[in-house]
Image (spheres, rainbow, N blue to C red):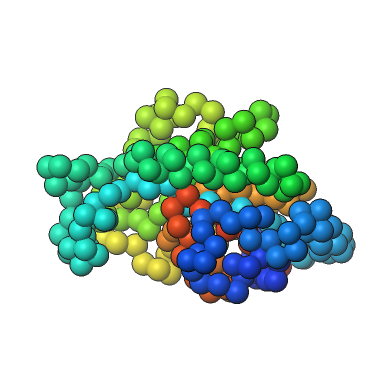
Amino acid sequence: MAARTYEAITGFFVQDALTTSTDIGPTPDFFGLVSKSWADFVDGIDKLCSKPSDTVSHKVLFLARHGQDNVAMIKYSQKEWDETWAVLEGDGELTWGPDPRLTPIGEEQARSAHAAWKRELLRGVPVPQRFYCSPLTRAIRTLELTFEGVLPSHLKPVILENCREHNGAHSCDKRRAKSAVQSEFPNFVFEEGFEEEDVSWTSKRETRENMERRAKLVLDRIFQDNHDDTYISVTAHSGWIKSVLRVVGREDYDLPTGGVIVVVVKGTVR
């Protein structure tokens, strides 16, 4: 696989100049598109992609964060969570590991994202041509609810190990066995070589540098495997999305649960 570097092309979306969604919410009108015209946006992307080059290509990434899954993060302070509860699977009242499901609020957040996509489809938003997802249940279920009736019938979302959340130590970030996920979500497919058991999860928390390495590997795959596809959807996690943003050279963005951020990325083969 050719070595690539990545750069965010900014100016298309209001989020490009923000680090938080406080003022615009998880799924703002036009997903934050400055021009408020998807036709104009597509024209601009077509112009970027029409310049012939063996070394430069562009992708539009629709990055989605899963809905709420772990109310223990609300019950306990950040200090209590980090120092005591994160490594456990529950407290006798709540269960949060391994691999927790969406809460009822989380399911509603995913349905709100679905409504946002239906709204933007009426305005001409380009439908993603490829769909990728974290292997954790909260992300898979979010994608399923978000794109119900939207996902083209011939496309099956691909589950990628490297799209998972900040890995290790915290029980909520340990995934289920491949066969269990496959049985519950038969309309998803796994990348080649996906392990049955969660062999990458350890008792040690993953470093920021390794998260960014994983994020770059996913970008490498997207750019390598989708030569003719420009619009890509990835449903994942806050920590993973922040890692992608750092890899493409832009500021962190605090995407809320159930939120969507669109990023235009230039990839250059070195």
- Foreground residue among 60 and 212: 60
Q: Residue at x 72, y 42 (%)?
A: 122
The total of numbered circles placed on residues is 0
Can the viewer see residue 69?
yes
Between 177 and 104, the one lying in front of the other is 104
Determine whether 135 is above or below 29 in the image: above
Percent of width and height locating residue 45: 79, 59
**Which quadrant: the N terminus?**
bottom right
Up the image or down, 99 lies above or below 23; here it is above
92 to the left or right of 203: left
- Measuring from the top left, give residue 191's x and y in whole percent: 53, 40
Q: Residue at x 70, y 43 (%)?
A: 121
Asked if residue 243 can be seen in this view, the reply is no
The percent position of residue 71, horizontal first and vertical second, equals 28, 49
Q: Is residue 270 left or right of residue 20?
A: right
Q: Residue at x 58, y 41 (%)?
A: 115
**Nearer to us in this view, 236 or 262:** 262
Q: What percent of the width, then of the height, locates residue 178?
A: 40, 34
